[in-house]
Image (spheres, grey):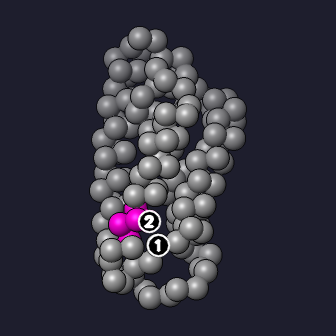
Amino acid sequence: MNKSTRQLLPIEARLLLILAVIYINHESAIPGIADYGITIKDKVEHFEAFYVLSFLLDFSFPLKPFNLWKIIVLLAYGAGIELFQLTVIFRDCSLLDFLADVLGMIVYWLSLPWLKRLPFLRDRWSVEP
């Protein structure tokens, strides 16, 4: 990967991160199906969303590893969504949703050694200042 392509990667990741946050904010604020039980589909969606957010946040700032600061940002965002949903009549705040968010981040972190071996992603970790 040439230098200009490496410089473009964080810009693209940041744009996708912004779009993902807008989409997630929208989905967490619109009326959903009122199902106050534990639904696997909802937990899978939380897991997937935070795996993708972890990936995009990590790629948006390639000079820093996926570390505590990135995790804190994602934890605050996930907690913020759940706290916001306390104020919305047609949504509910769920500790299990938040735990699914955390699981998505953990699985991303655990998958880093595998991701670093993929040819089309490998250059992300060789970015130089």
Which residue corresponds to mark 2? Answer: 82
Give the residue type at disc 1. Cys
Which residue corresponds to mark 1? Answer: 93
Do tag 2 and tag 1 residues touch (Cβ < 8 Å)? yes
Q: Is residue 6 visible?
A: yes
Position of residue 115 in the picture relative to residue 69 (left or right): right
Q: Where is residue 128 in the image (x, y as percent from the top left)?
A: 46, 12
Mark 2 is surrounded, within 10 Å at the Cα level, by few (under 14), some (14 to 19) or many (20 or more) other residues, namely: some
Helix, strand, or loop for circle 1?
loop
Provide the major secondary structure of the magenta segment.
helix
Q: Position of residue 47 (x, y in %)?
A: 57, 59
Observer-nearest residue: 13 or 76?
76
Position of residue 15 in the picture relative to residue 1 (left or right): left
Observer-nearest residue: 62 or 34?
34
Position of residue 78 in the picture relative to residue 51 (left or right): left
- Residue 129 picture quarter: top left
Q: Where is residue 10 in the image (x, y as percent from the top left)?
A: 37, 29
Q: Give the range drawn in magenta.
A: 81-85
- Residue 115, numbered circle: none
Give the residue type at disc 2. Glu
Residue at coordinates 51% horizontally, 53% vertically from top-left?
Answer: 50
Helix, strand, or loop for circle 2?
helix
Per the model, the C-alpha gap separating discs 2 and 1 is 5 Å
Observer-nearest residue: 1 or 90?
90
Residue at coordinates 64% horizontally, 47% vertically from top-left?
Answer: 106
The image shows residue 103, relative to residue 88, as above or below, that is above
Q: Position of residue 71 (x, y in %)?
A: 52, 41
User: Is 4 contained in the magenta span?
Assistant: no
Q: Is residue 48 visible?
A: no
Residue at coordinates 42% horizontally, 52% vertically from top-left?
Answer: 77
Mark 1 is surrounded, within 10 Å at the Cα level, by few (under 14), some (14 to 19) or many (20 or more) other residues, namely: some
The image shows residue 9, relative to residue 14, as above or below, that is above
